[in-house]
Image (spheres, grey):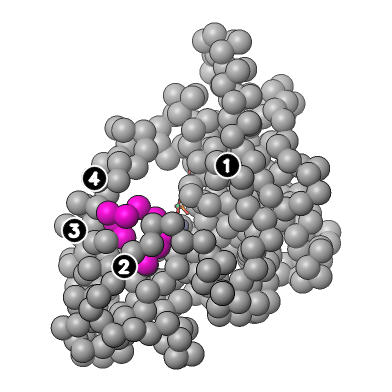
């Protein structure tokens, strides 16, 4: 639906949410073999995200909970991501370091337990997935660009295009990827009309740069934490080159890297349900169904305050 626009169109997304929500609930109930009267509470994403899409989910969840006479649990989207590895067949144990790399976020976090998250570093501009998508678009690849760009990179030759490694030696755990995208743009302009091999070389150079930064910063985060478990979540975590290099570096340092199943890495409802269930068990964040507000911008730090 969004492909022909080269990115997500907010209004189309929220209208599509309206069409899909009730059929999705029916499907979830029938596949899990649960009926509505067995539901103790309704968790939903309160933010951050696109206001329109959040409103559809929140209004639906609050209405459902009100009809069932159960409380609601508004959940922070990133908390869902941080706890999602626990849904995995081979879950890590608390505490662990999480590298969260998706179309919207690039962050390193320390996850100590439910509700105990420390932000160690994050992107100052574009997210890693966003950089993949924008660079892919520049090379004429379809959206979302990450998978297409990494497939093209497999045909690229090493070191033909050497792009900058933004903030590699900044001494902190922050990222910046917008300069990398500009470097690619400048290079493409210099070439005029790059041929197939040149495009593959550019894709390779871009991927090598971004992967090196992600791997080095993740290793720095885990080493300074003294922990031994690194979790990689978010769509970019599917990148094969990232996995290969992380496994190699981590293996040498006796660090275990966890890659949750892809369906739990990318945005999903199960991780929000899990975060809600854990908060329900702990007796925190429950509220009576009814009035609500969404939070399109919601710093994770506020969740812990
Ligand atoms: O977590 P996700 O599914 O959705 C959110 O953004 O929350 O992440 C999507 C991002 C897109 O930017 C997509 O291009 C990127 O993940 N992605 C990849 C790969 N597969 C998906 N990036 C690099 N290599 C991949 N194989
Ligand atoms: Zn997400």
Residue wearing tag 2: 293
Task: Tell me which label, 4 or 1, sits earlier in the chain.
Answer: 4
Residue wearing tag 1: 125
Alpha carbon separation for disc pair 4 and 1: 25 Å
Q: Secondary structure at mark 2?
A: loop
Residue wearing tag 3: 18
From the image, state whether disc 1 or disc 3 is nearer to you: 1
Give the residues drawn in magenta, as a range. 46-54
Q: Where in the figure is residue 174, as x and y percent of width and height?
A: 69, 50
Q: Badge 1, how many Cα within 10 Å: few under 14, some, many 20+? A: some
Alpha carbon separation for disc pair 2 and 4: 21 Å
Q: Where in the figure is residue 162, as x and y percent of width and height?
A: 72, 26
Task: Tell me which label, 2 or 4, sits earlier in the chain.
Answer: 4
In the rendering, which numbered label is found on residue 12? Answer: 4
Task: Tell me which label, 3 or 2, sits earlier in the chain.
Answer: 3
Whether the magenta-drawn stretch holds residue 52 is answered as: yes
Q: Badge 4, how many Cα within 10 Å: few under 14, some, many 20+? A: few
Task: Tell me which label, 1 or 3, sits earlier in the chain.
Answer: 3
């Amino acid at each position: 639906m969004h492909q022909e626009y080269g990115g997500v169109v907010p209004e189309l997304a929220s209208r599509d949410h309206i069409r899909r929500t009730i059929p999705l609930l029916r499907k979830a109930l029938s596949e899990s073999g649960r009926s509505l009267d067995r539901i103790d509470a309704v968790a939903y994403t309160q933010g951050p995200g696109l206001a329109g899409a959040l409103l559809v989910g929140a209004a639906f969840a609050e209405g459902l909970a009100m009809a069932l006479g159960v409380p609601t649990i508004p959940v922070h989207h990133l908390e869902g991501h941080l706890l999602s590895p626990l849904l995995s067949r081979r879950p890590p144990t608390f505490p662990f370091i999480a590298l969260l790399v998706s179309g919207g976020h690039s962050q390193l976090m320390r996850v100590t337990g439910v509700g105990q998250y420390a932000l160690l570093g994050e992107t100052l501009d574009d997210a890693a997935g966003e950089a993949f998508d924008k660079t892919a678009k520049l090379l004429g690849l379809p959206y979302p660009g990450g998978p297409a760009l990494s497939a093209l990179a497999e045909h690229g030759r090493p070191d033909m295009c050497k792009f900058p490694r933004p903030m590699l030696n900044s001494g902190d755990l922050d990222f910046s990827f917008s300069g990398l995208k500009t470097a690619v743009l400048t290079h493409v302009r210099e070439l005029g009309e790059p041929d197939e091999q040149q495009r593959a070389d550019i894709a390779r150079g871009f991927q090598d740069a971004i992967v090196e930064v992600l791997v080095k910063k993740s290793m720095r985060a885990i080493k300074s934490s003294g922990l031994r478990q690194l979790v990689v979540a978010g769509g970019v975590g599917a990148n094969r080159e990232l996995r290969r290099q992380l496994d190699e570096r981590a293996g040498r340092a006796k660090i275990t890297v966890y890659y949750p199943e892809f369906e739990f890495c990318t945005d999903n409802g199960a991780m929000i349900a899990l975060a809600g269930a854990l908060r329900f068990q702990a007796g925190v964040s429950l509220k009576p169904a009814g009035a609500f507000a969404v939070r399109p911008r919601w710093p994770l730090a506020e969740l812990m305050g």
